[in-house]
């Protein structure tokens, strides 16, 4: 929690203003107040608070206008809106415009403290993300990783910590999630940034040529070897080699890669003299290597050599809040920064499952920009497969899977019951339960710890 953070309160109700000011000062916050939107905006520009709490209905400048002005001047500033009981629809509209949360009058002190604490924690994460990107400013590879969702904040945090180390990194995730971008970001954040970054797609090189491509060969070592050839490891000397789709490395080559990682030497095809190398290795795969180890398709010792630092990239469907940011980024990338997507179009893009992840979204945006007739893209102009699938996902499975009581139900209780149901169905196999819930295994483990879920008969 960011104690002593500066908070601006804007409300025309002087008594409520005093109550808010007193309660938040008691928590150690630096509080400033304003009685209307215009003076509040002036204070915001002068004092740069970390958090703004504003009423929505005020004379003169409304809370909606103030919210838009604050977000225009400082998108990272967190805003909480106040609304009267029964006017939830207006609060929801404010959240669509960028508000973090809302409080319904009357609210108690604990509710106020909790909402403010969560808002400032989010502001702290956003600030950490901003500082990280500034730290890596000028490195285009890192700037192309777009996202402010908690999942991506976690990725940024790990990249920052491991970039300037010598640790081997294994990046996992579905195709199209941006594994090479993260590998390049790690290289750019290291002291090796001025040395080569060499990417090798292990799945794209024919099996009988892969050893030569990786380690090089001597003239005459096989038919067609008319001259000595330097391998990719030698080409990356002093820098970083990125082994993409490392799971597709033939089993017979895996011991040779293991030796490279253990002894830092390569042996070109046809040579009996190992060559010393000084290279940092970053690998990536969309395969479940733990499963492949059990099936005998991947060496366990090689896996642990590669997976010193694991980074798991979330699929786009698990961070849909990043879709509008990505859309804006791709509009700029493809030379159409003036183009915009309607609210309805963005909602349909967020509702679509994106089986091809960020790569599919990038291709979709490029196609829409090429085919557009104006600078505004509406929902009706989206590809049919997106609108149809988005509608299907919004409607849910036939008949639904939930029958909630009329009086409402706790979302946390629903989540806990879903985790328990999945674990019971999968005989408490966490990998299978995570797959059943369509979430990463580490997310399932986090939920289990959050709700103190343990297998019957086992200690926590």
Image: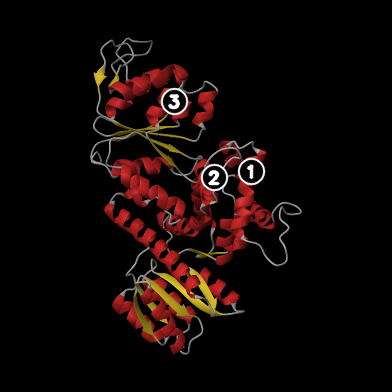
Residue 315 coordinates in the image, percent (x, y): 51, 46
Q: Which residue is mark 1?
A: 422
Res 218 → quadrant: top left
Q: Nearer the viewer, mark 3 or mark 1?
A: 1
User: Would residue 254 appear left or right of 454 to someone viewing this image?
Assistant: left
Q: Is residue 151 visible?
A: yes
User: Would residue 284 appear left or right of 381 to someone viewing this image?
Assistant: left
Q: Which residue is mark 2?
A: 444
Q: Which residue is mark 3?
A: 205
Residue 439 coordinates in the image, percent (x, y): 56, 45
Q: Residue at x 71, y 55 (%)?
A: 402
Q: Nearer the viewer, mark 2 or mark 3?
A: 2
> Is residue 159 placed above or below 272 in the rendered structure?
below
Disc 2 secondary structure class: helix
Q: Residue at x 23, y 41 (%)?
A: 191
Task: Mark 3: give few (<14), some (14-19) or many (20+) Cα within 10 Å.
Answer: few
Nearer-the-camera pick, 36 or 13 = 13
Task: Mark 1: give few (<14), some (14-19) or many (20+) Cα within 10 Å.
Answer: some
Q: Is residue 203 visible?
A: no
Disc 3 secondary structure class: loop
> What's the distance in space between the residues labelled 3 and 1, CA to CA?
40 Å
Residue 170 coordinates in the image, percent (x, y): 40, 35
In the displayed orientation, state which residue is furthest to the right.
399
Instruction: Pick whichever of labels 2 and 1 is earlier in the sequence.
Output: 1
Looking at the rendered structure, which numbered label has been put on residue 396? none
Instruction: Pick whichever of labels 3 and 1 is earlier in the sequence.
Output: 3
Q: Residue at x 43, y 51 (%)?
A: 152
Task: Mark 2: give few (<14), some (14-19) or many (20+) Cα within 10 Å.
Answer: many
Nearer-the-camera pick, 286 or 35 = 35
Q: Residue at x 31, y 54 (%)?
A: 132
In contact (CB < 8 Å): disc 2 and disc 1: yes
Res 193 → quadrant: top left
């Amino acid at each position: 929690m960011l104690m002593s953070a500066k908070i601006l309160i804007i409300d025309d109700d002087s008594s409520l203003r005093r109550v808010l000011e007193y309660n938040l000062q008691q928590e150690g916050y630096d509080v400033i107040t304003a009685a209307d939107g215009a003076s509040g905006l002036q204070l915001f520009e002068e004092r740069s608070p970390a958090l703004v709490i504003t009423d929505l209905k005020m004379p003169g400048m409304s809370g909606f206008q103030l919210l838009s002005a604050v977000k225009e001047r400082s998108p990272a500033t967190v805003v909480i809106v106040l609304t009267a009981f029964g006017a939830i629809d207006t609060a929801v509209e404010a959240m669509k415009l960028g508000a973090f949360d809302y409080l319904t009058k009357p609210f108690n002190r604990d509710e106020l403290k909790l909402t403010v604490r969560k808002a400032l924690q989010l502001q702290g994460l956003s600030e950490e993300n901003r500082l990280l990107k500034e730290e890596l400013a000028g490195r285009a590879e890192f700037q192309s990783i777009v996202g402010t969702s908690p999942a991506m904040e976690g990725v940024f945090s790990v990249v920052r910590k491991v970039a300037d180390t010598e640790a081997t990194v294994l990046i996992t995730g579905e195709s199209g999630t941006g594994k090479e971008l993260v590998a390049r970001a790690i290289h750019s954040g290291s002291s090796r940034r001025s040395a080569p970054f060499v990417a090798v797609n292990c799945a794209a090189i024919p099996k009988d040529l892969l050893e030569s491509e990786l380690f090089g060969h001597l003239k005459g070592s096989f038919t067609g070897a008319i001259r000595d050839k330097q391998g990719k490891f030698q080409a990356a000397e002093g820098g970083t080699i990125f082994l993409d789709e490392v799971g597709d490395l033939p089993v017979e080559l895996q011991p040779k890669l293991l030796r490279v990682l253990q002894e830092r030497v390569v042996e070109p095809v046809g040579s009996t003299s190992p060559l010393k190398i000084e290279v940092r290795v970053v690998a990536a795969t969309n395969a479940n290597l733990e499963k492949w180890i059990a099936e005998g398709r991947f060496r366990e010792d090689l896996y642990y050599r590669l997976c010193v630092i694991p980074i798991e990239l979330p699929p786009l469907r698990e961070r849909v809040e990043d879709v509008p940011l990505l859309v804006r980024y791709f509009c700029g990338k493809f030379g159409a920064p003036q183009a915009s997507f309607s609210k309805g179009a963005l909602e349909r893009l967020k509702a679509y499952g994106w089986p091809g992840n960020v790569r599919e979204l990038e291709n979709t945006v490029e196609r829409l920009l090429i085919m557009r007739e104006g600078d505004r893209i509406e929902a009706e102009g989206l590809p049919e497969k997106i609108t149809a699938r988005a509608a299907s996902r919004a409607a849910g499975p036939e008949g639904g899977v939930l029958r909630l009581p009329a009086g409402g139900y706790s979302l946390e209780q629903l989540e806990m019951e879903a985790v328990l149901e999945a674990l019971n169905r999968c005989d408490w196999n966490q990998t299978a339960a995570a797959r059943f819930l369509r979430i990463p295994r580490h997310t399932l483990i986090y939920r289990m710890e959050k709700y103190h879920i343990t297998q019957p008969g086992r200690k926590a």
